Amino acid sequence: MTAEAANHVPAVCDRASEPVIHPRWVRVTHWINALAMFVMIGSGWQIYDASPLFQSLYFPSQIALGGWLAGALLWHFAAMWLLVVNGVVYVTLGIMTGRFRRKLLPIRPHEVARDFVAALRGRLSHDDLSVYNAVQRLLYLGVILAGLVIVASGLSIWKPTQLKYLTAFFGGYDTARYVHFFAMSAIVAFLVIHIALALIVPKSLRAMIIGR
């Protein structure tokens, strides 16, 4: 063994001995979900522009996907099935493996307030990536619920006659559109925070790529 190769052995061993933070199924579903969400958001903005809910709000074509209504619908429906199938796999495995229970619960208001204040002061520790702080637990659980709402409201908009009871649950077709829009807004807000934190704490991005 050459001296150069020998120098690399400890580093390789150190990486191999690091604990697994995100198992493979979490990483795969995370990146598939990220792709599906960005496609759905971009195409959804194009669909929104064809029939806006707020007359003063339009999304620039540079950040929308599809070029026109029909093209956007094709992208939206394609990504919808990817999101739903991937989401079912993620939620099922998250419940069956106990990961959701371990990572996301419990959520205590006083802990959320404490960690939120610490985050604003830049004093929130990120030493142990395997443990989510209270704000992270609240955000991750919240975005999962927002994902369920956006899928259900989207289905009620897509098939308002066939799924009339689901559409009625949201208060009718027009109200379901508002629910869908605000669920999208919540997910976009989460993504902005999520990406910003990944840039601030780059080792969290590394963990989501290689698992350690």
Image (cartoon, rainbow, N blue to C red):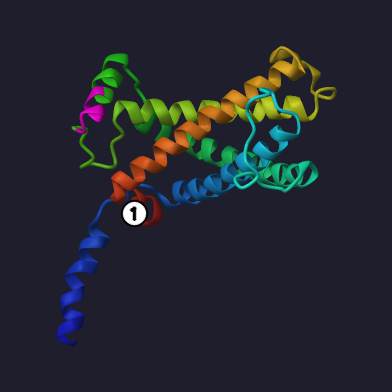
Between 158 and 65, the residue placed more toward the observer is: 65
Viewer-proximal residue among 168 and 11: 168
Q: Residue furthest right?
A: 161
Circle 1 — which element? helix
Q: Which residues are magenta?
A: 117-122
> Residue drawn 76% across and 47% down?
71
Magenta stretch: includes residue 39: no
In the image, taking residue 125 as reference, residue 187 lies left or right, namely: right
Drawn side of residue 177 relative to residue 203, left or right: right
Q: Most extreme residue toward the front, as rendered?
A: 56
Image position, residue 50 (x, y; %): 75, 34
Q: Nearer the viewer, residue 63 or 151?
A: 63
Q: Main secondary structure of the magenta part?
A: helix
Q: Position of residue 94 (x, y in %)?
A: 47, 37
Q: Residue 97, can we see it?
A: no
Q: Is residue 129 above or below residue 172?
A: below
Bin the neighbour count of mark 1 within 10 Å (Cα to Cα): few under 14, some 14-19, many 20 and up. few
Above or below residue 148? Residue 72 is below
The quadrant in which residue 201 appears is top left
In the foreground, 46 or 21: 46
Specify whether 65 is left or right of 188.
right
Residue 9 left/right relative to 158: left
Task: Find out whether residue 119 is within the magenta segment.
Answer: yes
Instruction: Determine if residue 66 is in view.
Output: yes
Residue 204 picture location, percent across and down: 32, 47
Name the kind of residue labelled 1 in the image: Arg
Query: Which residue is located at x 56 percent, y 49 percent?
Result: 35
The answer to which image quadrant residue 115 occupies is: top left
Query: What residue sits 71% from the left and 12% below the top?
Result: 171
Q: Which residue corresponds to mark 1?
A: 206
